[in-house]
Amino acid sequence: MMLSFLVATLSSCENKTPNPPDDSPTQIQSPSEAQTPTAHTAQGKVIVSFDYENQSGWASNQFAVWIEDMDGKFITTLYATKWTATGGYKTRPDSIPIWVKKFGVDSMQGSDVDAVSGATPRASESMSFTWDLTDANGNIVPIGEYKFFVEGTLRWKNQVMYSGVVDISGDSVTVEADAVFTFEASDGQDVLTENSPETNMITAVKADFLPASEN
């Protein structure tokens, strides 16, 4: 009887032993696999371009170009003038202030800032900046409509903001941006007007979407 009871007890314990852990490797999607375009991700590029006219004197010639989604979520910066991006915004808070806030430059590492900034152009020329349809982390964005912005500091607190919406889900398209000027005086500085030469600093802003089939 005692032997039978011991055998039954051991059998019961064996049945309650937990299953061994699953040692099979976890399937992790590699970065290259994660970035493979699908029917729902955009393919192609957007070129934001404009005519630039260098201004003489202080507190001018600063600008930034960036992309947002239709909900106003920041996607990526295409370009920002290096003087502002690398600290000038601290000594002159009026320099492209909307981009500074959107980009969160205060919390960015130097390498992140360097990747999107460049020297202020010294001459008047046609400028163009290419968006490869990825966000700031390198992820391909979904197809759909996106906003593009060009913000410029004309002189001190006087600003211009160009914006437009480009659809990256179909055929090639060209979109001309709308301009909103902000004219404001500052200490010791007169307010600009629509006839001031500084309003020609950035003109003819547009975005061209070129799908992959046309590249």
Image (cartoon, grey):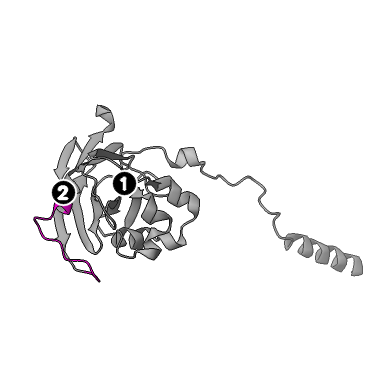
Q: Tell whether 133 sits left or right of 157.
A: right
Q: Tell whether 27 sits left or right of 179.
A: right
Give the number of the disc on residue 165: none
Q: Secondary structure at mark 2?
A: helix
Determine if the magenta segment contains residue 196.
yes
Q: Are marks 2 and 1 in contact (CB under 8 Å)?
A: no
Q: Secondary structure at mark 1?
A: loop
Determine if the magenta segment contains residue 60.
no
Which residue is pictured at 43% across the width and 46% down the height? 115
The N terminus sits in image quarter: bottom right
Specify start and end residues of the magenta stretch as a single range. Answer: 186-198
Does residue 77 show up? no
In the image, residue 131 sits, relative to residue 195, either above or below, namely above
Residue underneath mark 2: 200
The chief SS type of the magenta part is loop
Relative image position of residue 18 (x, y in whole percent): 71, 60
Q: Earlier in the sequence, mark 2 or mark 1?
A: 1
Viewer-proximal residue among 160 and 53 = 53
Which residue is pictured at 29% across the width and 64% down the height? 94
- Kind of residue at disc 1: Pro
For the image shown, how many numbered marks are present on the structure?
Answer: 2
Instruction: Name the residue at the left extreme.
Output: 195
Residue underneath mark 1: 142
In the image, residue 206 sits, relative to residue 20, either above or below, namely above
Quarter holding residue 28 = top right
